[in-house]
Image: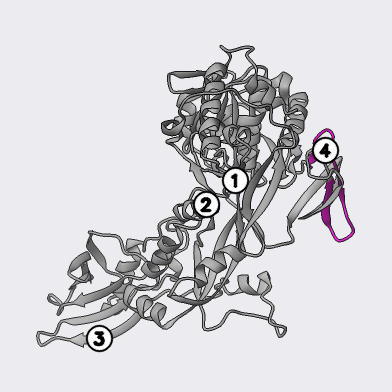
Amino acid sequence: MSRFATLLAGTDYPARLVAWRGDERITLAAFRRDVAALARHLRQNKVQRVGLICPDAYGFAVGLFAALAAGAVAVVPSNTRPQTLVDLQGDTDTVVGEHWASVAGEAAALPLFPASTRLEFQTSGSTGRPKAVVKTLAQFETEALALERLWGARVAAAPVLATVPPHHVYGLTFRIMWPLLSGRAFDVRTHDVWETVLAALPADAFLVSSPAHLTRLAGIAALAAGRRPRLVLSAGAPLPFEAAREAQRVLGRLPDEIYGSTENGAIATRRQENAAMAWRALPGVDCRVEEAGHLALRSPWAEGGGWVATADLAESGGEGFHLRGRADRIAKIEGKRVGLDEVEGHLTALPQIDDAAAVVLEEGDAALLAALVVLSPTGREEAGSLGLFRFTRLLRRLLADRLEPAGLPRRWRIVDAIPSTAMGKRPAALLAAAFVVTDPPRLPDQGETRRLPDGTVEMELGIRPDLLWFRGHFPDLPILPGVVLVDWAIRYAQCSAPAFQIKFKAPVLPGDALVLTLPPRLGKTRQSFEYRRGSEVVCSGVLRWS
C-alpha cells in the first residue's frame, strides 16, 4: 500500500502544517479534505487522464493526489508554455490549473491506492516529440526515504522554499514528495527572483534551487548568520565552481548538487569544496563508467532496478565520477532540458524557414543555444525589410509559445544550406564552426551615397549584427558604442585628430538602418554631422580641428 495513500486516508496529525501561502497556513486536515473533494469530482466525471499545470505547488499536489485517488493517470508536461497547455488539453480529459478549487465540490472518503499507482511525465525526447516517462509512487517513496536518511538530520524540521517549479521531477521530489512523507511544510510559491526568495526565507530553511538561479547571486548582500538555510540543493545541470563559491558567500552554505534524470530520479551528489570534486552515487545507487565512456547506473528507484545505460559521458575520478557531457541531442541550457530536435522541428514549422539546425555553443562556463536557418522566400522578404536583428527577435517571439526561454536560440546564422558531411550528417562541431568569426567587420554596410544641391552628403549605413563593436556591449542587449559613431563620422568626413561636441539621443541596435548626414563644412575647421534612423535623430555633433 502507498505511504501517501495511508497518509491521506488517515486521521492522525490533522493540525500538522503541510504548506503555507503568505500568511495562510494549510494543515494536513485541509489537504486531505481538498484531495478528497477533487478526487470525487474527477470520479463523478469519469476522468481517465488528468493534466497538471498548476504553478502553485499546493494546487499541484492536490491535483496530483486527487487524480491518483480517482484512478486516473496524472500527466505532467515538460513546461507550462501556452502551446504546451493546448497540447495537454488535447491529450487529457481535463487539466488541473490554478482554479482547481472551483470544481472541488463536496469531500468524500479516499481509497487506499497502491504504491504501484503510475504518473506520466512528458520530457523532450531525442526525436523532437515529447517522450512519456512513467514512474510509480513506490519509486518516489523509496527515493524520499533514501533522501531522509542522507539529509534528514541536517534538515531537521526546516520549511521548504523553491525556485524550481513542481512539474519538474526534481521539483516534485524535493519540494513536495519528500516533505510530505517527512513532515515538513513547503511554500506554495515558485520564486523567480532572489528578492522574493530572501524576503520570504525563514530561519533554518531548506532551499531547493537550480543553476539558473544560483548563477545570478552576484551583487546580493550576504545573509546574516541567523537567516542562513540549513541546506541548499541544486539540480538540472552542473553548477559552475565560481557560482558555488558565490552561493556560499551569499547564503552561507555550499550547495549540495544533485545529478539525476526524469527516468532515474536522483543518482549522485557533490559539494564543490574544490574545483575537482567528483560526483558520488547516493546511498543505494551503483554507478560505473562503461568502455565507451557512457555512465551506467543501478538504482532502487529506477524502473526495473537493473543496470541502465545513460546518454551521459563520464570518466572515473577519485571516489566517484566526473561528467563529460551528453552523447545524444538532449542538452542542458540554464539548467533546463532542451531537445535540439524539438527546437529544429518548431523552427522548420515556421513559414519563414525552410531548414534549420540547432547547436549548443560553449562560452566560458555557460552553454547557449544557437540556430542555423535557411530562409524561405517569405523569410528572405521579411529579413530584408526588418533587418537581421529584428527578424531574429520575431523568430524568438514566434517560438515562445511552444518553447521555454532556455529553448529559444540566442545566436543565429542565416545560411544558404545547413553544413553537412559527405554522408549527409550534421555533426555539432561543423555546425558550431559557422559561428566562429575570424575577422569581424569594423565598418557598417555602406549603401547609396547622395550629394544634395547645397553640398550636403547623405550616406546610407546598414548596422550589421556581427560588427566587432557589439561583442560584449552588452550580452543581453547589444548596443553600438557611441564612440564608434564618432569614429565613423571622423572617417567619412576625412578629418584628422579633431575635438568634438556630441549629443547621443537614442541607442543604435543591430540591424538598424541609419543615414549619416554631412553638411558642407563650417569654415575650415568645423564639420557638423547627424545620424538618423528614419525621422529620428540618434546622434549629432560638431567636429573641430586646428
Which amino acid type is shown beneath numbered disc 1?
Answer: Val
Residue, x 27% and y 80% (percent of image)? 460
Q: Is residue 376 above or below residue 343?
A: below
Cα gap from disc 2 to disc 1, whole angstroms: 8 Å
Q: Position of residue 222 (x, y in %)?
A: 53, 27
How many circles with numbers are drawn on the protein? Answer: 4
Q: Are marks 3 and 2 in contact (CB under 8 Å)?
A: no
Which one is in front, 330 or 166?
A: 166
Dot placed on the residue nearer the N-terminal end, 1 or 4: 1
Cα gap from disc 3 to disc 1, whole angstroms: 62 Å
Outermost residue on the left side: it is 454
Which amino acid type is shown beneath numbered disc 4?
Answer: Pro
Which residue is tagged 2?
88
Q: Nearer the viewer, mark 3 or mark 2?
A: 2
Please give the range of residues in magenta.
Answer: 278-297
Does the rendering let one see residue 334? yes
Dot placed on the residue nearer the N-terminal end, 2 or 1: 1
Q: Secondary structure at mark 4?
A: loop
Report the disc number at residue 300.
4
Q: Nearer the viewer, mark 4 or mark 3?
A: 4
Q: Secondary structure at mark 3?
A: strand
Which amino acid type is shown beneath numbered disc 3?
Answer: Thr
